[in-house]
Image (cartoon, helix red, strand yellow):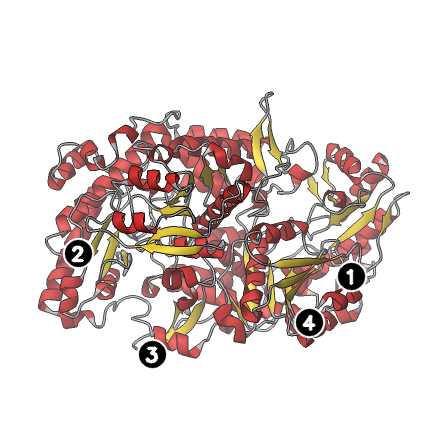
Amino acid sequence: MPFVANTDADRAQMLKVIGVQNVDELFDDIPPEARIQSLNLPEGLSEAEVYDHLHRLSHRNAHNLICFLGGGFYDHFIPACVDELAGRAEFYTAYTPYQPEASQGSLQAIFEYQSAICRITEMEVANASLYDGGTALYEAAMMALRITGRRKILLDSGVNPIYRNMLYCYTTNLAVAFEEIDTRHGQSDRSQIAARLDDATAAVILQNPNFFGAVDDFTDIIAMAHERGCLAIVSVYPISLGLLKTPGSMGADIVTGEGQSLGLPLSFGGPYLGFMATRREYVRKMPGRLVGLTVDAQGRRGFVLTLQAREQHIRREKAVSNICSNEALCALRALIYLAWLGRQGFREVASICAQKAEYAKTRLSAVPGVTVLKTAPTFNEFTLELPCSAVDVVSRLIDKGFAPGFPLGRYYRGMDNYLLVAVTEKRTREEIGLFAEALAGVL
Amino acid sequence: MSQLIFEKSVPGRRAANLPRLTPAERDVKLRIPKKYFRATEAPLPELSELEVVRHFLSLSHKNFCVDGNFYPLGSCTMKYNAKVCERVAALDGFSALHPLLPQLRGGGMLTQGALQVLHETERMLCEIVGMDAFSLQPLAGAHGELTGMMLIAAYHRDRGHRKTKVIIPEAAHGTNPSSAAIAGYTVINIPTGADGGLDMAAYEAAMDDGVAAVMLTCPNTLGLFEAKIRRIADIAHDHDALLYYDGANLNALLGRCRLGDLGFDVVHVNLHKTFGTPHGSGGPGAGPVGVKATLIPYLPTSVVIKRDDGTYALEYDRPKSIGYVAPFYGNFGVILRAYAYLLLLGRTGLRRVSENAVINANYVQTRLKAYYDLPYDRRCMHECVLSASRQAVRGVGAADIAKALIEHGIHPPTIYFPLVVKEALMIEPTETESRQQLDRFIEVMIEIAELAEKHPEQFQNLPRTTPVSRLDEVKAVRDTRFTA
């Protein structure tokens, strides 16, 4: 039987030691009427059969389209060393480092990951990871409620609509009042935010670049929020931080984001990586595991899980979050990726993405009938206005081998003719050119 | 002294080898005004690729792991993770698949292979635990619990029930009360009875029409099957309360009984425990949630359906759904590994999993109970909970025993949990360990018990041969150094 070591002889001997006649006796506590003899499932397959079956299924997925699709999830290159190192069994077959002497590898890696997240966001403290960018944003909102004792949240509609849906889902049973700030095309609307900020507002939630690709500097909005005793939560695309102004330098109180772009495959939606960073003063209100520096009995440097009194296994119903398993292996991948990029590479990869996107804009805006929205500067994702429904254009471009972008009409009323296009460092000049030609061909 | 990666940095050194821009791309003017740029480069480490590789390889050498060490961490089901599952998850057709593709056209015609994996995994999980439908969205066990609580809230709200409380045993995993509280419920704790099961008198006294749900794990955290489970379910259902199953301990029951038949209404399973996906030093996991038919309308959006023509689609139009608990379809890469695992084992293999998990745990319990206290002297299921109380009298607590095990190259059991047992040692061997491995572990545990009797002072400096010895956790809390 796969993966079971004991032979029938072993089992017989063990049952004798235990003092039972047969294995069924060990299941005696199950009510007789609920016992079953077998499951209605097929018998097991050989390793070769399982691999062949999945190999065949993998070919029934359109992963080979030339990808201009982003929407918060990007087709970045993953260096080979990320897979090699994160694929070490010492990392992937270990569990949460509850026993620090037997887990210094994982603990030091998490400490370095926390440090790397702080360095790219210019924040003071980061946790060991959350599930994904959306749950991280939800946790940030809960954290703001805890810190301020207030119940209202201003939510910019430039925040990823999937994340906004998640926020609404999680807070259905809680007394939280969301007010959306209507943002279309460009940067966040300062006057709307100013008008709706009040002394009951716990947080304003913003995203940079926003879902339309617009790059912003939220310094003024955050200052406005702070005057009202309100926190600023900023969701960021980490690759953009190679170039763009950091949320830390804008004055953000809590920073979250999706870490998929940092060395994680798209993998049809997960596993991903939620990161969160905040100010030192809020660390005890922050959810998630946290690794701290200490020393051993001989004074040698070592790492431990710390401030566990915030967590569910200690505090139970009074814990700041219920999280237990997080995304440790994904955090390790992000750390390896950032270490491979290094100081220069982190800037360069962002710069290449932005430059290629700017080039794509020039090519696509030359297509008759197509307008590139210029209401705000953009990083590597931008919005096209088409002369017809974006859904139809997308469909025709898929047939030509492209994942051409995301039709905004799906989440924004009245934007049926708008297409969100992303460009990463993986897209070549030829691919961008072919994409422009294909677009011209289908309009 | 372990050097941090940042301390190995040399200005100007690099590993990154990135695509070059063509002249045409380079010559386009970037239209981002200076004020939107970061002021200084992020101070990431500067190393050659070999230095990066050596750094992480050296870190890997400082970890215990299932592939290298016996790892009987109770409640975590640290079984072997089949290598073929890693190979499957790395196939380009899965790993390079963009999650937004199904939203572009035809509800998923671009991702039929992936949707088939999701659909068939759901169907197999339904059969294994006796539920009518599953959502694979929850991203971890605790996330499954929260999702389950939200489903239960939606169910009661839809029926006009006014429910504010959730009943949970004191011995439950900490995630249970935490998840219930985060979903907006008041937690009612029930003590453990004399037989190690739920205290039935306290349970009946606590039950009333304000109770939305009862959260249980079965076998419970003492490794004991909740023998009165049917009675517990009936009492809950008499008050319109739903019975929730925390799947942490499902490894005991595969092919032996189905939770739906025991009276459970909502179930989460931990793919990273029961279905053999790797724990990754603390995730990623996956915590799919299964429900009885009455709760199907509330399941998270989207749901995978199989059409009459045999194709698969994602259904988004679900008016009563609680909405999006995850951005897409769950931790797909984890689900994919579990799917491969289920295909490898099949009906007989799954039943053999639980048989061997239960035999292994009982074998350890039987052979060690002369040396360690056994607070509830019954046959256990997939794990056993011993107590180091006897040793603690000599000054050797559960933590000291854990450190002595590390010195022997064995990962310690879960210690000091469940809280209802003093000096708890919660041992879960799993089915993938052999009798010979268990014998070695048992011998070491006996040796440790004897040493505790004769030379308790020798535990003070353990472990000695690990990269660091005992760490000062108080200093970590006091110093609050979380970054370099």
Q: Secondary structure at mark 2?
A: helix
- Work out which residue is located at the far top of the displayed protein and give it: B309
Q: Is residue B202 left or right of residue A348?
A: left
Amino acid type, label 4: Ala
Q: Which residue is mark 1?
A: A187
Q: Which residue is mark 2?
A: B444
Q: Which residue is mark 3?
A: A299
Q: Are marks 1 and 2 on the same chain?
A: no
Residues at circles 4 and 2 in contact by the CB criterion of under 8 Å: no
Residues at circles 4 and 1 in contact by the CB criterion of under 8 Å: no
Q: Are marks 3 and 1 on the same chain?
A: yes
The circle drawn on residue A225 is: 4
Decide which of A197, B222 is in the foreground and name it: A197
Q: Are marks 4 and 1 on the same chain?
A: yes
Residue at 52%, 48% (x, y): give it.
Answer: A271
Q: Secondary structure at mark 4?
A: helix
Query: Could you say which quadrant of the image residue A141 lies in?
Result: bottom right
Decide which of A155, B30 is in the foreground and name it: A155
Query: Which x, y percent locates residue B109?
Result: 65, 31
Q: Mark 4 against mark 3, which lies toward the viewer?
A: 4
Mark sitting earlier along the chain (4/3): 4
Q: Are marks 4 and 3 on the same chain?
A: yes
The subunit letter for the residue under badge 4 reads A
Residue at 21%, 72% (x, y): give it.
Answer: B460
Alpha-carbon distance for marks 4 and 2?
A: 60 Å
